[in-house]
Image: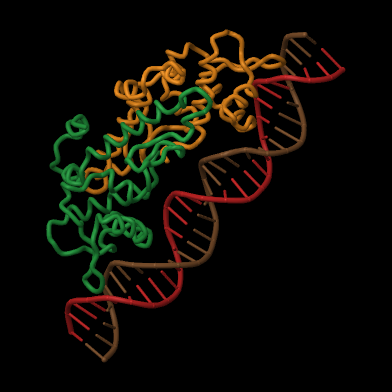
Chain colours: A orange, B green, C red, D brown
DNA sequence: GCAAAACCGACCGCTTCGGTAGGATTTGGG
DNA sequence: CCCAAATCCTACCGAAGCGGTCGGTTTTGC
């Protein structure tokens, strides 16, 4: 599997927050019940989302979480990265100060790294899919009257 | 990380085999030395490739492995799948008899699965990248006189 | 002040990862 | 015919991550 349930649960959590039209926060236990997910596990996940600045929290009674910005402005690559860590196909890919990726096997002798081309393409495909999808799209898609799934997927 | 070193090592192994022009097999220890990888671990990986029909083996002295078909006919999705198992973004994706993928959270109440759209797009991106790359391309790319990396990546 | 909620950190069983070890079997060459 | 080289097979092992659980602390509205 490319991703663990951290991404799965975390994205569901975000969609649940995005579904709420009101400005008042909703509690984690509400989300946990709606999605039938373990509350104490969601706490760990929402902590990552909060540290990444994707959700804000209000403590105390009637507290809870809400999106830190409109759902249309939240790209899913940020969400998945907050939950799963750096998105790279391989251990040997790491970020450079310029924000690019490099393969550390780069200079094995006189040849180029034989796998780099492949992982660059995979990286591109995943990044494109994640960055090209907003939370608002997922909220819209999950509504019962949403357009046919084939249409939306095709638009990727 | 999306993939483990099984894919990394296994792909390097395949490239090494693809580099050999002759028809005679090359031994694992030769590959291990060339790529500086542990021989006993490579044995496990090459076993998966053999079971998947991607390489053939000849036992005994002067034995070894060779590609089961021309490198240009070997698509990397087959290689990675043989090494890592089914390529799916999520646990809840599984193959159907028709060869498609489905999300098992499909019918949670009256709403569509809120994450399905996202994982479908990711799945599409990865599959396109892997299936659109052949072993021959990687062999070509890893030669010192290969064309610039930007050109090849762009062609994805 | 009580209850509801966010917060925090420790723990735990399980599986996978990356690798090692030891052997068995097959085969070509001397 | 025997030995060395090679594939093949099974078991094991430490470390790490996954998917939680638990107990507690702090904050806040009513």
Q: Is residue B80 left or right of residue B23?
A: right
Residue B134 picture quarter: top left
- Residue A87 rendering spot, x and y as whole percentages: 40, 32
Q: Is residue A55 left or right of residue B48?
A: right
- Front residue of D1/B89: it is B89
Depicted B39 relative to depicted B105: above or below: below
Residue A78 picture quarter: top left
Residue drawn at (39%, 26%), measured in percent from left and top? Answer: B117
Q: Is residue B46 left or right of residue A43?
A: left
- Residue B138 rendering spot, x and y as whole percentages: 21, 44
- Front residue of B62/B110: it is B110
Location of the N terminus of chain B (image quadrant): top left
- Front residue of A95/B84: it is B84
Count numbered badges in the picture. Answer: 0
Residue drawn at (51%, 23%), measured in percent from left and top? Answer: B110
Q: Is residue A137 left or right of residue D24?
A: left
Depicted B68 relative to depicted D22: above or below: below
Residue drawn at (24%, 58%), measured in percent from left and top? Answer: B55
Depicted B49 relative to depicted B129: above or below: below
Location of the C terminus of chain B (image quadrant): top left
Depicted A128 relative to depicted C10: above or below: above
- Front residue of B17/B111: it is B111
- Residue A152 rendering spot, x and y as whole percentages: 34, 21
- Residue C2 rendering spot, x and y as whole percentages: 84, 19
Residue A39 visible? The answer is yes
Residue drawn at (47%, 11%), measured in percent from left and top? Answer: A70
Residue B1 visible? The answer is no
């Amino acid at each position: 599997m490319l991703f663990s349930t951290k991404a799965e649960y975390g994205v569901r959590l975000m969609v649940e927050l995005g579904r709420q039209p009101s400005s008042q926060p909703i509690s984690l236990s509400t989300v946990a019940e709606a999605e039938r997910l373990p509350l104490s596990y969601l706490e760990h996940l929402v902590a990552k989302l909060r540290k990444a600045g994707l959700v804000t929290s209000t403590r105390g009674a009637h507290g809870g979480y809400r999106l830190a910005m409109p759902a249309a402005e939240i790209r899913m690559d940020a969400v998945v990265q907050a939950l799963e860590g750096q998105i790279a196909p391989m251990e040997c890919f790491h970020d450079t100060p310029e924000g690019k990726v490099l393969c550390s096997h780069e200079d094995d002798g006189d040849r180029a790294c034989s796998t780099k081309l492949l992982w660059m393409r995979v990286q591109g495909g995943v990044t494109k899919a994640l960055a090209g999808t907003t939370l608002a799209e997922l909220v819209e898609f999950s509504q019962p009257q949403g357009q046919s799934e084939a249409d939306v997927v095709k638009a990727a």
